Image: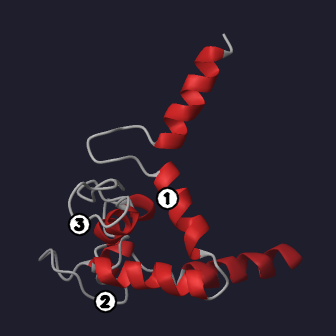
Amino acid sequence: MRGRGLRRQAEAMNTTTENPEDLTTESGSGTESGPRAGSPFGPGSPFGYRPEHAALRRPFQDRMLAGVAAGVAHYFGVDVTIVRIAFVILTLIGGAGIPLYLAGLLLIPEEGSDQSIAGSLIESLQSRSR
């Protein structure tokens, strides 16, 4: 008897599922609509991975100091000024802006490079110890 009750509950839960493609596209036209319109989780892109999305890099253009704010802004598609203001606000309130900027400087590679400053430093230390 108890097994039947659990089975009914499972069947009831399964009847409310929706097809993810129905949520993102409207009648096969390719235009996004519904509750997930504009989200990074489109059809064929698991967990938000979008191949056309550029890699996070510190560009040579739009730099003020080391290009961290410009790289983050380009990656997320927002204005560089907004990211710079966010770094200043984080620095003034609690001082987190400076360590975050330094972490970005060390961990985000420059444009045209595949390795960050921290990665090349670790690699050189490993090669010395051999």
Classify residue 114 by image quadrant.
top left
Residue located beneath label 1 in the image: 104
Mark 1 or mark 2, earlier in chain: 2
Give the SS element for disc 2. Answer: loop
Seen from the viewer's position, the closer of residues 66 and 107 is: 66
Image x and y of residue 100, in percent: 56, 67
Seen from the viewer's position, the closer of residues 20 and 95 is: 95
Q: CA distance from mark 1 to mark 2?
A: 36 Å
Image x and y of residue 87, in percent: 48, 78
Image disc number at residue 34: 2
Classify residue 103 by image quadrant.
bottom right
Mark 3 or mark 1, earlier in chain: 3
Q: Residue at x 16, y 80 (%)?
A: 31
- Image quadrant for the N terminus? bottom right
Circles 2, 3 touching at the beta carbon (< 8 Å): no
Left-right relation of 59 to 29: right
